Amino acid sequence: MLRRWRRGGRRGAGSRAAASPPAGVGGGGRGAGWWQQAQLALELESKEEGRRSAAAALMVRLLCSPEAEVADHYPDLTKVALQRFKDVAAPIRLQMLDAATRLMADAIPPVQEQVQALATERLSDPDERVRCAALRIVCELGQRPEVSMTRASLNAVAGRLKDVKLSVRKEAASGCMTLFRTAAGLLAKGGLPDELDVSVLAYPARLAAAALSDPELRSHVFVLLHSPGLVPLNTPPAAAARVWAGVWAECEATGRDALLRLLRCKAELAGEVARLLGHTRRLRAASKAPEPDEQQLASFKRRQAR
């Protein structure tokens, strides 16, 4: 399928004419190119899951091939292919999510926008595995500076903290923390890009609130929140303060209470760690001290006897 124009695309990597659609496509005719397009469209909508899967894999390769210009020449076929994100079979939806990272890297911008929107829609998929995969993909894409993460997208990710499945809630918590760490690093260096909505700074408070209301999720969230590096470790104090001021500004009243508890716990934990390190250093120094000789021991005993 599509063999004729795929060869043409490879033949002329530096020429747009070489990647032009076959005769009959786009000009109103019904040539070989139209037939090939129609056949692939039928495969993408076949009743057999295996055929849909194979056709979707082929379309992903073609959409990621710059010289083929499939999205330009075959917009209807591209639309049908991207609908596999909504396929009735969960394995095909997972297959498309697995391909999303590659499509976001290699496909043209209009396709990238559709892929991001379709991946975000899968956050509410009926299948638990698909929701987890969608969370991983959306949060991975959200770390890229060129990818736009709107308030709606960030709320959709955080909304999975209330999912009925614990595995999805854990994935959502990990994704929220990944996005926050990325945002904190950017803010510490100067500011958030326009592509990343400022509401990402409310994630620590939302996670802390989720931990208070969800006993099953609590231990996982505590590990995320209390691990070092919420703000990059080498961040100057003034920049770190700017990050936490931004976090405070984005929190609602209930979120601020949870955030205060988190900061108090982190301060207490930091104090305990500092004391532990001090004891460790003293023990290490004592273990390296020279053993006392007999005269020193005798002198010590005489002093004790007095």
Image (cartoon, grey):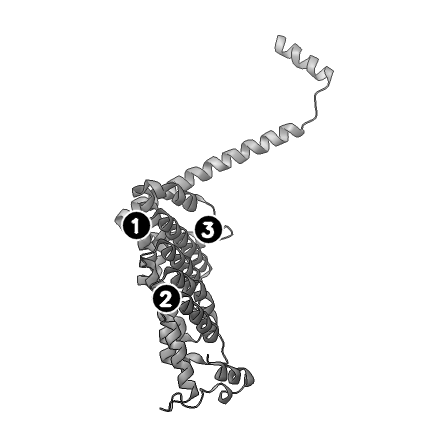
Q: Amino acid at mark 3?
A: Pro
Question: Which residue is label 2 attached to?
Answer: 85
Tag 2 and tag 3, C-beta contact below 8 Å: no
User: How busy is the neighbourhood of tag 1: few (under 14 within 10 Å), some, or many (20 plus)?
Assistant: some
Tag 2 and tag 1, C-beta contact below 8 Å: no
Residue at the spot x=41%, y=51% of the render? Answer: 174
- In the figure, is residue 300 to the left or right of 211? right
Mark 3 vs mark 1: in front: 1
Residue 285 in the image: above or below residue 191: above
Furthest-front residue in view? Answer: 48
Question: Which residue is label 1 attached to?
Answer: 162
Q: Which one is earlier in the sequence, the residue at label 2 or at label 3?
A: 2
Question: Which residue is label 3 attached to?
Answer: 237
Gap between marks 2 and 3 measured at Cα = 45 Å
Residue at the spot x=39%, y=39% of the render? Answer: 265
Q: Which one is earlier in the sequence, the residue at label 2 or at label 1?
A: 2
Q: Amino acid at mark 2?
A: Phe
User: How busy is the neighbourhood of tag 2: few (under 14 within 10 Å), some, or many (20 plus)?
Assistant: many
Gap between marks 2 and 1 measured at Cα = 23 Å
Mark 2 vs mark 1: in front: 2
Q: Amino acid at mark 1?
A: Lys
Quarter location, residue 155: bottom left
Q: Which one is earlier in the sequence, the residue at label 3 or at label 1?
A: 1
Residue 58 visible in rendering: yes
User: How busy is the neighbourhood of tag 3: few (under 14 within 10 Å), some, or many (20 plus)?
Assistant: few
Residue 71 in the image: above or below residue 276: below
Q: Quadrant of the C terminus?
A: top right
